[in-house]
Image (cartoon, rainbow, N blue to C red):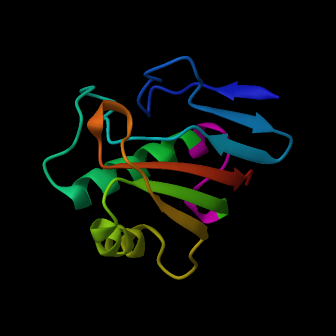
Amino acid sequence: MKRIKTKNAPKAIGAYSQGSIFENLVFTSGQIAINPISGNLVTDNFSKEVEQVLENVKSVLQAGGSNLDNIIKLTVFITDMSNFKFVNEVFETFFINDYPARSVVEVSGLPLNVNIEIEAIGSKI
């Protein structure tokens, strides 16, 4: 097993790694909308928050030898299910023809009071 560490995604805000590689599988830790360059949260608009989270997921997957096309399963945590439609709208721009398996779970709170967190399992390219 190997841990993933990349400057292209936000560093962990706690005692965990950005992701792990086990055999042919790449696991990301939950990603939130932190811009990895500025270190600032993107929270001015929910759709932009989703975009930043997916960019972070993509960066961790790429650092582990995977990509968005090789995602096996995504788990999406949102604090308000009324934002579900915006999640779908953004996903349709990141995943054009083939959507990964996905669960969306409403939760009462997320780290740094963000509105969305996404974790992924992908296979190596």
| Residue at the image position 68 percent from the left and 54 percent from the top | 122
Residue 115, percent across and down? Answer: 30, 49
Dividing the picture into quadrants, the one containing residue 109 is: top left
Residue 79's place in the image compared with 82, above or below, is above
The answer to which of 7 and 110 lies nearer the viewer is 110
| Placement of the C terminus among the 4 image quadrants | bottom right
Residue 54, percent across and down? Answer: 42, 53
Residue 42, percent across and down? Answer: 22, 42
| Residue at the image position 58 percent from the left and 44 percent from the top | 62
**Residue 111 magenta:** no
Dividing the picture into quadrants, the one containing residue 94 is: bottom left
Magenta highlight range: 61-69
Residue furthest front in the image: 108
Q: How many marks?
A: 0
Residue 82, percent across and down? Answer: 28, 70
| Residue at the image position 58 percent from the left and 22 percent from the top | 16
Residue furthest bottom in the image: 97
Dividing the picture into quadrants, the one containing residue 99 is: bottom right
| Placement of the N terminus among the 4 image quadrants | top right
| Residue at the image position 70 percent from the left and 33 percent from the top | 20
The answer to which of 15 and 10 lies nearer the viewer is 15
